[in-house]
Amino acid sequence: MSVLPDGEACREQTLGEIHAAALGQPCDGQVADYIPALASVDASRCGIAFATLEGEVHVAGDADMPFSIQSISKVFGLVLAMQRMGDDLWQRVGMEPSGQPFNSIVQLEWEHGIPRNPFINAGAILVADTLVSHFSSSRQAFLSFVRRLAGCERCDINEEVLASETRHGSRNAALAYLMKSFGNIEAEVEDVLAHYFFQCSLEMSCRELATSLLFLANRGVHPLSAERVTTPRDAHRINAILSTSGMYDQSGQFAFSVGLPAKSGVGGGIVAIVPGQGIISAWSPALNQHGNSTRALKMITELAGRLGLSIY
Ligand code: GLN
């Protein structure tokens, strides 16, 4: 059963009101510019989608406009790595919140090249290493996987963002080389970074993102294709780490005020998993100091509050 108020018009209206309220307030925050190609995105863009397990997608605003999913790609990478590696993966990456900015390097040396979790950059680069080592073409495998989940052959990377990330990727390269020095990266660092930058530069719309992740709200089975993407145990584990680490060093505050597993990206997108019900995906490019979209955060907070969606 969908939790939105009954009736198609009423459902769209709830999202429409939340979207209008977010647009009506002054937009705090700044578009990410440390990846120069992201700085040219129109900051007034704003969209939200709620995909339900029944196959309905309710939308408002720019919900069909593709945007750079950035760190939200870390979820897809992790799912693929868990499928391939099983429990061995957890020997090489942790499951604890870092309490640090997403691209921080300090903890990594203290902790001997084992990243705190798969949703900070170091963790996702480690996951990228496992994909490069397990697939003959990890980038193609990644893209096919996401397209299948989203039911969208059109989803693709943005070449300009990819080139920009690659050119300005010194910090990610530093994280990768540090892990390599501890023996926790197996493949060539260049290949690992190429995969990592590739997945970050994928573009999807709110509608496509929400649809693609429905399996996380459904104990691992994608409700539209009936494909079992993960075991119930792995769906539980991914949602658990999303709850504690998906919003970086704002994860505690997000749990406190919203109470849903979620993942953000510096493209301005946030996805939130509503177990047993569906996926919310919101996007607006301006970010707060933690790298999370201010308007997407407002819209998801409002929707979760109005519909009583907290899992706690
Ligand atoms: N591509 C970005 C980076 O590596 C992803 C970070 C993010 O979305 N938080 O810094």
Image: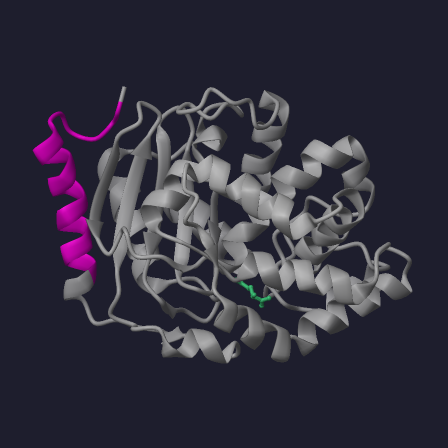
Image coordinates of residue 125 in percent, x first then y, are 70, 58
136 versus 125 height, above or below = above
Q: On the rendered structure, is 14 left or right of 162?
A: left
The image position of residue 195, as x and y in percent, is: 67, 58
**Residue at (58% x, 51% y) in the render:** 74
Q: Residue at x 41, y 47 (%)?
A: 271
The residue drawn where x is 61% and y is 59% is 99
Secondary structure character of the magenta stretch overall:
helix
* Left-right relation of 227 to 168: left
Q: Quadrant of residue 7?
A: top left
Q: Is residue 7 magenta?
A: yes
The answer to whether one can see residue 128 in this image is yes
Q: Which quarter of the rendering shows the N terminus?
A: top left
In the rendered image, which quarter contains the C terminus?
A: top left
Question: Is residue 54 shown above or below 47?
Answer: above
Determine the image quadrant of residue 50: top left
Q: Is residue 112 left or right of residue 119?
A: right
Q: Is residue 302 above or below residue 33?
A: above
Answer yes or no: is residue 32 visible.
Answer: no
Q: Nearer the viewer, residue 252 or 64?
A: 64
User: In terms of depth relative to the viewer, which is nearer, 78 or 4?
Assistant: 78
Q: Which residues are magenta?
A: 2-22
Determine if the magenta segment contains residue 303.
no
- Ligand 1 quadrant? bottom right
| Residue 127 drawn at (x, y percent) | 71, 49
Q: In the displayed image of the protein, which residue is found farthest to the left?
A: 9
Q: Residue at x 54, y 36 (%)?
A: 239
